[in-house]
Image: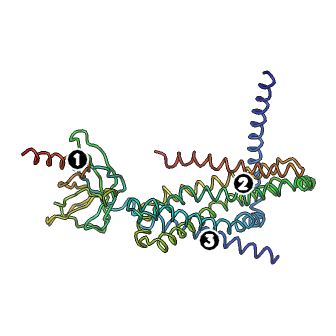
């Protein structure tokens, strides 16, 4: 009985310690901003690794998600004689929810796991210790550019996901199913609000960008420096990011759109 | 160094594409291009029942949107709803005896205010009130009236 209580206490304390270390790491990352601004090339290389290399999966997924929304939305809406509202349905669901959330999940799987593995292996092969030996702070030099690379890439990728998705929905709805071209765009423009929908979607994806990269960097930095440890850290990155994104999405949606 | 240059170009293209996508969403998908918030002049109208009219619902004349509903409040003294309309400044010649109706777009569509111009030589200006209004048609009331009149016919 006492043992069970003790193990529960140990679990809680270690969870709290993890949260504390994660915040200290974030502070260290933010303290590296001036030195990152002095070497913008480090950031550019990370924007390439996280943003540009994720483009293909984001664009293709966005197109298909938009096309599926077009098909399914048409099926439901045509039963109410409201097929002209297809544009509204496709664009609001993409801009408000699917764009930021699916992009965050894809980036967590595509770039977040790569970040964790990279940093975990740097730790395992003692490259991070090597940097410290040369009086270079590995957090500032290695983690800060990666953090901001993810932070800046995420909203851009989410915007592209939504834009391509709307075009996919347009292609299916107008091109294949015969929804009126003018009604598709005009109803969409009448109902989608710039501040209410699009700015809130961008805010969501910025938050997701912070959370996903933060989790990936923390897991990599804290990984046990063995091959098994790095593999566990990579798995944790994907699982924790997915849970954090979906949970935060509910909170953000309730704050933004809940009455 | 040539490798870094390619990376820079690709990152530049990526960021440009991201901003183009945001611009596309702002201009083509949302109503930012058509937004005219704040400017224009305000008219008010009193309705006995506004149905499901909402703030930002369109105000149209002859089917063309001339403004939006800016505010809706309830007047406790007259038991009426007071609706403030924000009319686009381009449409500055609305006759003083204009009739304001609440219509429904389609059977289940959203409600909007339709203005029927009168014949007065005077025009409404900022802050004026539209005197002639007609409330929203509530479907349940219409069905109720219809059933009631049918029942009366049957009893004769």
Q: Residue A173: image x %, image y %?
A: 48, 69
Label 1 vs label 2, nearer the camera: 1
Q: Residue placed at 48% from the left, 55% from the top?
A: A196
Q: Residue placed at 66% from the left, 47% from the top?
A: A244
Question: What is the number of the mark on residue B17?
Answer: 3
Extreme-left residue of the structure: B156
- Label 2, on which residue? A213
Question: Is there a contact, CB below 8 Å, between mark 1 and mark 3?
Answer: no
Q: Mark 1: which secondary structure?
A: helix
Q: Mark 3: which secondary structure?
A: helix
Task: Say yes or no: labels 1 and 2 on the same chain.
Answer: no
Q: Earlier in the sequence, mark 1 or mark 3?
A: 3
Between A106 and A144, the one nearer to me in the picture: A106
Q: Residue A163: image x %, image y %?
A: 56, 67
Query: Dot 1: few (<14), some (14–19), or many (≥20) neighbours within 10 Å?
Result: few
> Which image quadrant: the N terminus of chain A?
top right
Label 1 vs label 3, nearer the camera: 1
Q: Is residue A107 left or right of residue A204?
A: right
Question: What is the number of the mark on residue B141?
Answer: 1
Q: Chain of mark 1?
A: B
Q: Residue B29: image x %, image y %?
A: 48, 66
Q: CA distance from mark 1 to mark 3?
A: 53 Å
Between A73 and A5, the one nearer to me in the picture: A73
């Amino acid at each position: 009985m006492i043992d069970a209580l003790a193990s529960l206490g140990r679990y809680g304390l270690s969870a709290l310690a993890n949260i504390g270390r994660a915040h200290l790491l974030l502070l260290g990352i933010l303290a590296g901003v001036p030195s990152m601004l002095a070497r913008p090339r480090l950031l550019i290389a990370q924007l390439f690794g996280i943003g540009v290399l994720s483009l293909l999966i984001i664009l293709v997924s966005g197109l298909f998600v938009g096309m599926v929304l077009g098909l399914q939305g048409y099926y439901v809406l045509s039963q109410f004689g409201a097929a002209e509202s297809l544009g509204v349905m496709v664009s609001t669901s993409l801009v408000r929810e699917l764009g930021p959330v699916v992009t965050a999940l894809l980036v967590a799987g595509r770039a977040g796991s790569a970040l964790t593995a990279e940093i975990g292996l740097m730790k395992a092969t003692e490259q991070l210790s090597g940097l410290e030996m040369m009086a270079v702070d590995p957090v500032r030099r290695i983690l800060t550019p990666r953090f901001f690379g993810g932070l800046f890439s995420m909203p851009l990728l989410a915007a592209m996901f939504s834009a391509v998705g709307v075009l996919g929905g347009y292609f299916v709805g107008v091109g294949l199913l015969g929804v009126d071209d003018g009604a598709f765009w005009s109803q969409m423009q009448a109902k989608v609000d710039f501040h209410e929908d699009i700015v809130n979607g961008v805010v969501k994806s910025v938050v997701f960008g912070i959370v996903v990269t933060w989790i990936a960097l923390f897991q990599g930095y804290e990984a046990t420096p063995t091959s098994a440890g790095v593999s566990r850290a990579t798995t944790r990155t994907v699982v924790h990011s997915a849970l954090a994104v979906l949970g935060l999405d509910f909170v953000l949606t309730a704050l933004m759109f809940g009455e | 160094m040539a490798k870094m240059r390619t990376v820079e170009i690709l990152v530049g293209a990526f960021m440009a594409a991201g901003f183009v996508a945001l611009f596309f969403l702002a201009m083509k998908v949302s109503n930012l291009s058509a937004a005219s918030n704040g400017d224009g002049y305000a008219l008010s109208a009193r309705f006995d029942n506004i149905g499901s009219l909402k703030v930002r619902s369109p105000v149209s004349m002859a089917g063309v949107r001339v403004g939006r509903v800016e505010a809706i409040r309830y007047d406790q003294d007259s038991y009426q709803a007071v609706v403030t309309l924000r009319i686009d400044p381009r449409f500055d010649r609305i006759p003083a005896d204009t009739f304001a109706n609440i219509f429904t777009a389609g059977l289940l569509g959203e409600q909007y205010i339709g203005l029927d111009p009168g014949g007065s030589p005077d025009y409404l200006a900022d802050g004026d009130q539209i005197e002639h209004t007609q409330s929203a048609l509530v479907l349940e009331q219409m069905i109720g009236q219809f059933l009631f009149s049918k029942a009366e016919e049957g009893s004769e």
